[in-house]
Amino acid sequence: MKNFLFIYKTKKNYIGYNLKDMSYYYLENIYLEKSENKICRLTIKNENYIYIEFKNFNKYQKEVEAHKGIIFIEFYDSIYLCESRDVKNIFQRKKESIDYFILEDIVDFKFYYDSYISKSNITEDIVKMLEDFNKTREIIKFDKISGKIYRVYLEKYPIKKENFSNIKIEKEKYILDGTRIRPLGDKIDLSKYVGDLKPVYFTESLFSYSNPYSVYKSYSCRSKIENEYSIHGGKGNTDFQAYSSSIGEAYERYSARFFEYDIEHIIYDSFNNLKYSSSCDVLNPELLCLDKNYINKYDGDKKYEWIKIKNLTNNKDTIVPANSVFFHIIEKIILCFIHSRQQE
């Protein structure tokens, strides 16, 4: 392990990341100890702290929530220093922002690495993290690859369905200005919506001298089955427009994700039954662009998955097919397939 920062398992072999040349290597015939999460205590300058190694992303150490105060969290590529209330959100953000190609290959969500911290090895980096945290009380990150220490801002992982019952409908005059409905002012700074612990965790310029237009791509948090939907693009007449476009598309797709808490809001019924039994409007799927080639043709008497939304044109609750709302939805759910979704 000493030659590799971390190792993970694929279907065929193991892959290790060598920090010295910053390259990945295929590994064979290696022995690795079990990859399990650990909770222990550290003493730094006569003060006690909780330290967690997260090696197994399949299991969140819920017992850590019983500890109050400052906690060190180590992952395969980084260490965070935070309040105990932020541990679960950081864990979820890290799990959903694993590098695209690693997430494509990893089979068990387990990482193997030697702990950077130990009771007998409190490095200057760890002391510096603690000093910075005590100054601001903000989350501090140590990047194992770059060796840099900096503040990060956490956008908490959503745990419930937001309530839009008090949403205000405002009429605006939209003027078509060439290629967009509203001109995008350069004063709008979307960079604050991108970060290590945010829904959009990375952006990248695809600038090419052969292309007269700026192009960016962005990466959004996702589960493993959503990995192929996590890269988004944006283009524009200026570099700023392309950058903003890529972030906007990423947030649009992220907001359309099927989160765990959405399951309890799913309605399983047929359209013909809902239109008589429901107290609110129900959207007839036949008004949508249904896929005529789909093997299971839509039937008004067949049960499908639905969800209640807020109709912004009349401010009324409306029940609509679930996959007209969610960009990607779990495969077990029965859907009335919409052509436009199948083409995306």
Image: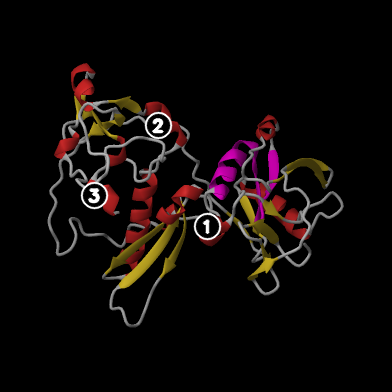
Locate the N terminus and report the quarter of the image it occupies.
bottom right
**Which residue is rendered at x = 24% and y = 49% of the image?**
340
Question: Which one is nearer the viewer's eye here, 315 or 58?
Answer: 58
Spot the residue most to the bottom: 210
Question: Which one is nearer the viewer's eye here, 12 or 120?
Answer: 12
Res 301 → quadrant: top left
Q: CA distance from mark 3 to mark 2?
A: 25 Å
The residue singled out by tag 2 in the image is 161
Span of residues in magenta: 70-95
Residue 162: give x, y in percent of width and height. 38, 32
Viewer-side label of 1, 2: 1
Q: Quick check: marks 3 and 2 in contact, CB under 8 Å?
A: no
Q: Quick check: marks 1 and 3 in contact, CB under 8 Å?
A: no
Question: Which one is nearer the viewer's eye here, 85 or 24?
Answer: 24
Label 3 vs 2, first from the N-terminus:
2
Q: Residues within 10 Å of mark 3 (few under 14, many from 20)?
A: few
Label 1 vs 2, first from the N-terminus:
1
Q: Is residue 84 magenta?
A: yes
Whether residue 222 appears in this view of the structure is no
Q: How many marks?
A: 3
**Which residue is rendered at x = 70% and y = 66% of the image?**
27
Q: Tag 3: residue type? A: Ser
72 relative position to 285: left or right: right
Spot the residue most to the front: 295
**Image position of 208 with respect to 186: above or below:** below
Locate the C terminus and report the quarter of the image it occupies.
bottom left
The residue singled out by tag 1 in the image is 104
The residue singled out by tag 3 in the image is 340
